[in-house]
Image (tube, grey):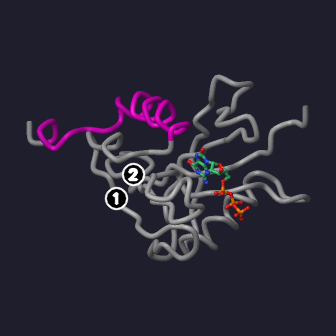
């Protein structure tokens, strides 16, 4: 069987040191995925490193440049198996220039506040990844109630 194609994506947060908002993107295409939310990103092209591909995809899809933080290491040889055809790697990221807009395959982007990161209909394969992301950033994401004490 052919080895799965590598997809790279970003969990873009407002602040890598204190992540409170997560950027989710709603797919407009293809019809089978339209209306579901995902991490912006895409396939790695021949000759690209995963990180190069991720920067390219975020420029093309959202019009932003990012700084990458830690990778959210997955259970499938360090990555996240998302289907028979694809395996995904995901990095935390922070915008360093540009204002994100849904330029290509998305019709909406949304900053999800802390505590509501799972509250949109993510692509099926992303649900466990969002859960892992919430768990991995829980220690850093301080609620507004915490801040006031
Ligand atoms: N970008 C992205 N793709 C995901 C996620 N979760 C998930 O199952 N996928 C699937 C959807 C697609 O079937 C597959 C490939 O992603 P893609 O369609 O964004 O790749 P791409 O931008 O390179 O697409 P294209 O230029 O070939 O049209 O991965 C996710 O969180 N982000």
Q: Which residues are magenta?
A: 124-147
Instruction: Look at the numbered discs 1 and 2 and tell me whether their residues touch, using CB distance below 8 Å.
Output: yes
Of the numbered discs 1 and 2, the one sitting upstream in the chain is 2
Q: Is residue 17 left or right of residue 57?
A: left
Q: Nearer the viewer, residue 16 or 106?
A: 106
- Measured from the top left, where is residue 128 in percent x and y? 49, 30
Calculate the distance from the C-alpha at mark 1 to the C-alpha at mark 2: 5 Å
Q: Quadrant of the N terminus?
A: top right
Disc 2 marks which residue?
A: 22
Which residue: 32% across, 52% down?
112
Q: Main secondary structure of the magenta part?
A: helix
Which residue is painted at 64% across and 23% down in the image?
Answer: 75
Residue 105 x %, y % = 57, 68
Q: Which structural element holds mark 2?
A: strand
Count of numbered marks: 2
Residue shown at 58% from the left, 74% from the top: 104
Q: Which mark is residue 91?
A: none
Any magenta on residue 22?
no
Q: What percent of the width, then of the height, locates residue 76?
A: 70, 25
In this rendered view, identify the residue nearer to me: 125 or 24.
125
Please give the label number shown on residue 111: 1
């Amino acid at each position: 069987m052919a080895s799965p194609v590598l997809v790279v994506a970003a969990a873009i947060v407002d602040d890598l040191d204190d992540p409170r908002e997560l950027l989710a993107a709603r797919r407009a295409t293809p019809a089978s995925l339209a209306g579901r939310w995902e991490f912006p990103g895409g396939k790695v092209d021949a000759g690209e490193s995963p990180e190069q591909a991720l920067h390219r995809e975020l420029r093309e899809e959202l019009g932003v440049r990012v700084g990458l933080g830690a990778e959210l290491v997955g259970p499938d040889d360090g990555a996240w198996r998302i289907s028979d055809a694809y395996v995904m790697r995901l990095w935390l990221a922070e915008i360093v220039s540009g204002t994100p807009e849904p330029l290509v395959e998305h019709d909406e982007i949304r900053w999800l506040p802390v505590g509501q990161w799972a509250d949109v209909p993510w692509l099926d394969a992303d649900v466990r990844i969002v859960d892992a992301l919430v768990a991995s950033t829980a220690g850093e994401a301080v609620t507004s109630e915490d801040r006031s004490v």
